[in-house]
Image (cartoon, rainbow, N blue to C red):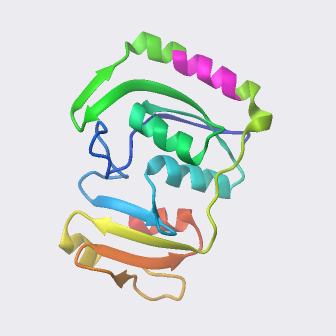
Amino acid sequence: FTGVVFIGYHAMASNSEAALAHTYSSKKYQFIKINGKEYGEVGMDGAIAGEKGVPVILVSGDDKCVAEAKEIMPWTETVETKKSFAFTSIVSKHPKAVVKEIYEGVQKAVNRLDEMQCFTMASPVTAEIRYQRTDCAVHANLIDLEGMPFEMVDGYTRRGRLNSVEDIILRMK
């Protein structure tokens, strides 16, 4: 693939000013850290694409999601679809305007393909997953590189080393 486009993404779970902020599940995870830094879906999915040699060329979402994307992938085109103020407080652009902006953003991204880069993380990765509930953390079936269960950091958090970001996602199921 030449590039990937992320449409309709949300900011990471810990962002209290972002509409519908979550990291894969607002009911299950408080945060996910990789190599000590918190990432949301934009960063994790971007790293998985990068592991496969595919750059993220466009991200669309609210202003908080766009800020996350620009922080870790400054070369990526972005389209801000709404301004967020809280989990359920936003000011959205008209859908027709957003469709037009996304179309134009993809065109710009395609015209800049030679500037696009793959977002990657040093591996192996250390994953730290904080759950919403202690029972989810205790019963999480997370096995590390050595075949051992992830460490219990506290009642909510598990930590372990894996080969890649994709391995984190596969184990979270």
Q: Is residue 78 visible?
A: yes
Residue 162 at what x, y percent from top left?
54, 75
Q: Tell me if 144 is positioned left or right of 163 in this view.
A: left
Is the residue 97 above or below the residue 147 in the image?
Answer: above
Residue at 27% in and 26% down? 90
Q: Is residue 141 visible?
A: no
Residue 87 at what x, y percent from top left?
23, 38
Is the residue 127 above or below the residue 45 in the image?
Answer: below
Is the residue 35 above or below the residue 116 in the image?
Answer: below
| The N terminus - image quarter | top right
Q: Tell me if 144 is positioned left or right of 141 in this view.
A: right
Residue at 35% in and 76% down? 158
Asked if the stretch drawn in magenta spans residue 32, the answer is no
Q: How many dots with numbers? A: 0
Find residue 125 and report its image quarter. Answer: bottom right
The secondary structure that most of the magenta stretch takes on is helix
Residue 128 at what x, y percent from top left?
41, 71
| The C terminus - image quarter | bottom left
Extreme-right residue of the structure: 114
Residue at 46% in and 17% down? 98
Is the residue 98 above or below the residue 6 in the image?
Answer: above
Residue at 68% in and 39% down? 3
Asked if the stretch drawn in magenta spans residue 106, the answer is yes
Per the rendered image, the range of residues in magenta is: 101-109
Residue 74 at what x, y percent from top left?
62, 40
Find residue 130 and report its image quarter. Answer: bottom left
Q: Tell me if 70 is positioned left or right of 33 in this view.
A: right
